[in-house]
Amino acid sequence: MQETAEWIAVDLSNGCLRVWIMGANGEPIAQAVTDKSAVIETHSGFETALLALVAPYLAQDHRVTCVICSGVAGWNVPYVATPCTPPQRVIAASPAFADPRIKLYIPPALKQMSPPDLMGGEATTIAGLLRSQPEFDGVLCMPGLHTKWVHISAGEIVSFQTSMTGALFDLLSQQSVLQQSVAGTAWDAQSFLTGVGDAMGRPQAIASQLFGIHAATSLLDMSGGAARARLSGLLIGLELAGTRPYWLGRHVAIIGVGDTALHYRTALAEQGVQGQLLEAPPLVLAGLCASYESTQNSAK
Ligand SMILES: O=C(O)C(=O)C[C@@H](O)[C@H](O)CO
């Protein structure tokens, strides 16, 4: 017989919905990820996608607690100001989940007033990191649609800076003249490094360097792999040019998944910074567990 969830951990980051079905012993009994076609950016789309993943594990006679690390557009999530420890105390998500079998909780988001910046679910990942490494002192690079650079000291998020690098890559590769140039999944490592160096050397020329990819594809037979890698390299190089105070001479941990995290490590290594790679999902789960414990403690 299918086991019922004790509670459900929900990660909604970078356009992807991942759930861990947690058993009574505090360990996951199952996990699942939505496929890319699911619409999760709206409240109703998110509800449909979440139910599709968790429905078999819901109880019929009581509400199952779901703890989610970041919200959907239109949710009413309060902000906590930095510097602060990553918030673990969660609140009931608003608007509430329509299905009566689920009670959804979310931690507050973070705000930095000067310069103005916002952080959502990454704070839960940071809580997870500090659970296993409470002494961590340094900088986190968290690649994504909105890459975060976060200064951590004495268990606190001291300051952070967001760069829309992943979002720019998606927009340019899907909705610009570069779409044809970068099609496919091939990758040319040298073109990536050259792109990083060109953007860092002349960040003011980025708009021209980007069009140059289209021109080189048309005139010089630049391959799709070289074009794709150069686009990524230019954008990551531009980001590194703008975040120098965060990484120069610092202990940097890169928290991410897959190739993107590796590309950041490669780009940083070229600048003489050996970034430590950490897998994001276990840290997100650890942070969600800390949030769930806070719901249990406040219920006592
Ligand atoms: O709270 C908001 O409004 C954000 O935009 C936060 C966002 O940057 C996430 O931290 C990562 O996508």
Image (spheres, helix red, strand yellow):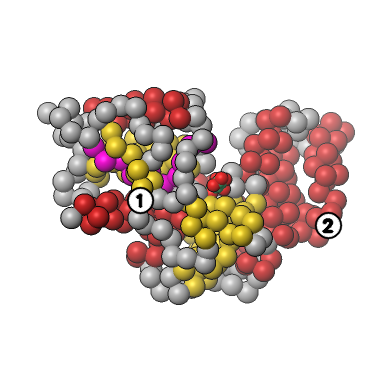
What's the mark number on residue 202?
2
Residue 180 in picture, x, y percent from top left: 73, 28
Q: Quadrant of the N terminus?
A: top left
Give the residue type at disc 1.
Val
Q: Mark 1 near ligand 1 (CB under 8 Å)? A: no
Q: Is 70 one of the magenta-colored residues?
A: yes
Residue nearest the viewer, comparing 196 with 139: 139
Report the span colored magenta: 64-73
Is label 1 or label 2 in front? 1
Quadrant in which residue 115 is drawn: bottom right
Residue 78 in picture, x, y percent from top left: 47, 49
Residue at 30% of width from left, 40% of height from top?
66
Image side of residue 8 versus residue 169, left or right: left
Residue at 16% of width from left, 46% of height from top?
24
Residue nearest the viewer, comparing 159 with 256: 159
Residue at 53% of width from left, 63% of height from top?
82
